[in-house]
Amino acid sequence: MSATSVPERRTRRKGPAVDIPSREQIIEHLREHGVPIHADALAAALGVHGEAEREAFAGRLAAMERDGQLMTNRKGALCVVAKLDLITGTIQGHPDGYGFLVPDDGSADVFLAPAQMRMALHGDRVTVRTTGVDRRGRPEGTIVDVLARANREVVGRLYEERGIWFLVAENKRISQDILVPPDLRGDAAPGQVVVAELMEQPSTHREALAKVVRVLGNYADPGMEIEIALRKHDLPHEFSTPAKRQAARLPSEVRSADRNGRLDLTNLPLVTIDGETARDFDDAVYCERTGKGFRLIVAIADVSHYVRDGDALDRDARERGTSVYFPRRVIPMLPEELSNELCSLKPAVDRLCMACEIAIDADGNISRYQLHPAVMHSRARLTYTQVWDWLSHPGETRTKESRALQPHLENLYALYKSLAAARARRGAIDFDTLELALEFDAQGKIERIVPVARNDAHKIIEECMLAANVCVAQYLAEQKHPALFRIHEGPTPEKLEALKEFLAGSGLSLSGGDTPTSADYAKLLSKIRDRPDVNLLQTVLLRSLQQAVYGPDNVGHFGLGYDAYTHFTSPIRRYPDLLIHRCVKACLAGARYRPSGASWPELGVHCSQTERRADEATRDVENWLKCYFMQDRVGETFSGTISGVTHFGLFVTLDGLNIDGLVHVTELGSDYFHFDAIRHALVGERTGKSFRLADRITVKVARVDLEQTKIDFVLADGAETPAAGTRKKTRRKP
């Protein structure tokens, strides 16, 4: 490629008028050149002249190195990574010291031995050269270069041994100890939880070096588990100054100008129905009879009126992706001025909303719908318990308010029954699951674990929200407007084959051939309801399904049995819903909405990741609290169900507590136990004794390790119990 041809294919960078070659042009030239080339020579060959152009060009080369497209060899020359047989990806650490490279191109993970992991931390982006296979047949490699560091700060516990201070990260995927010079530990004492800033990243010859920037407190302090989770999972928990300023400037009530062009629903007796502790009310509902059918109105808080694309509140909301609901604490996606006040559909005040008006026939089929920007006035803030009490005892004396609302609630209940019947005909999958709630003492520790009382009032709201989400998804699909759909695909061929093999061993089969539908799953679930092994079968069916994600490709929702589905009904607490509101408004105005700063596929990946991040953080907190709860129960015996089977043992979930622990394979008896992946079982070689997924089992609590958030069980049939208590932390040798 000649230098004179380059200017015709250059790209313009933002800021001053500086034209530089694109990434594609740089890669193309390096490939045609055939050998590594120094940056100055490359700039000259591509016609890059002048100080501003060279500075911009150097920035682009640096970005390409960070992204793993280029690397600089030992002689200082630039190379195309793809031509060096190197693999670029992200490090996934393991608590035992080794790790894996997860390649960007989706190819097989590459095993990294503990010696390789000395120079990188979990989350770092690196290039790796494969060197062979490990003893399990996995690709094995060596780290060639660290492209980008993922960890600027680390939260962990500070320890001191023989004058050496070091940090043990709470994120157990960071297995390396981090040295803290004594003069950089501040006021932190041994055993305290701290936030440390990495001053030097790890290398082949030395450990990472850090200084303490904040002391969070002692490990067992109330609320410490949440403070740790926030930092361990890098959850944004403080709003930016621009977002706070924007929130402070918002009005306290709906203004006259805000009502222009909106449908007036203030005369309708819309109500919110939520849990007792809810404070952010996204949705309100109203239902009336129309002949044999129903007219349903689902009103959703119009967050998009106040949070505009690209403004400070939007930037913070996108970064968070979702509100995070910890026990006794919420990290909201939006400041409380919005989430609990201006956008919350509180009773007795006007609120802006997006209304989905749906006509539904007696069989639960949606015949038509309309979407409107509207203004509403909630008549009451009701709870699930309250509504179910009214519906269960309609003849009892009520207040004037309840008597006025009772007919509308009865209409909603009748509508729910029709929608539930349609759901069954559609073949949506309905797994029986038990939800438990944590009750706390004054110190913020678990006092009791109790079943959640779930009634038909919960299901009324669920079906109404499903109906609104389906209508909006159908509307955007018909408008051919890009959007984020809620995608749930069927089982992968590998999982389907494993499922069929397992079912065959139980004398069952799944209809639908190689492409089963949700109806095929629902049919099988109805067939096994009364079997003694129903829990096992339901667990295996559930685990065969893929995880639901957000994405722009509308491939439908397998579990719900919908051809198109999206999230529209919770814009206060979910960023995808806010995006969908903007899409709907754009379509109603005959326009198109294009999010700033990211493409739809990128937003789908980001929102899916923030959802998983929130789930992992809340799970960490609950697991720690459950471990704390079980500390005083070492030696006690419990009944439970085998909830996981691996080659190293059994995971058991205790009845009525939803607390998990491990029975190690060495505790199963004097035999060699082999893992049967198809049967989800550990089987004794000599005795033939089998432990299968969902089997009932009685265990004794052997040990609770708060530090590792682990509980060890042994079989409660007289097996020897290991020493109770927690392990003392010892420093790993460098």
Image: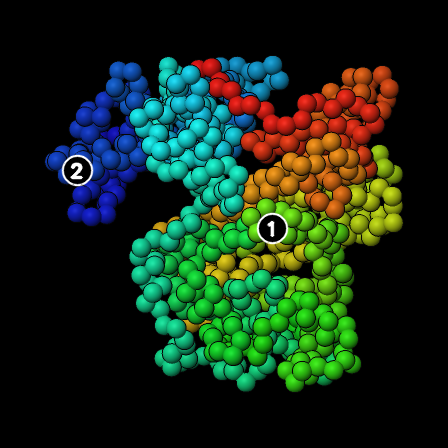
Where is residue 545 drawn, in percent x and y? 67, 44
Reply above or below: 555 against 639: below
Q: Quadrant of the C terminus?
A: top left
Of 590 and 704, nearer the camera is 704
In the drawing, does residue 331 fall left or right of residue 674?
A: left
Q: Quadrant of the N terminus?
A: top left
Residue matched to label 1: 441
Residue matched to label 2: 53
In the drawing, does residue 253 fall left or right of residue 25?
A: right
The amino acid type, in three-letter code, at marker 2 is: Glu
Q: Along the polypeptide, which appears first: circle 1 or circle 2?
A: 2
**Tag nearer the camera, 1 or 2:** 1
Q: How many other residues sit within 10 Å of disc 2, few (<14), some (14-19) or many (≥20)?
A: some
Q: Which element carries disc 1, helix, strand or loop?
A: loop
The amino acid type, in three-letter code, at marker 1 is: Asp
Residue at (67% x, 82% y) in the render: 399
Q: CA distance from mark 1 to mark 2?
A: 64 Å
Scheme by which the image is coloured: rainbow
Residue at (62% x, 17% y) in the render: 136
Of 469 and 461, nearer the camera is 461
Of 621 and 193, nearer the camera is 193
Q: How many other residues sit within 10 Å of disc 1, few (<14), some (14-19) or many (≥20)?
A: few
Residue at (45% x, 45% y) in the render: 235
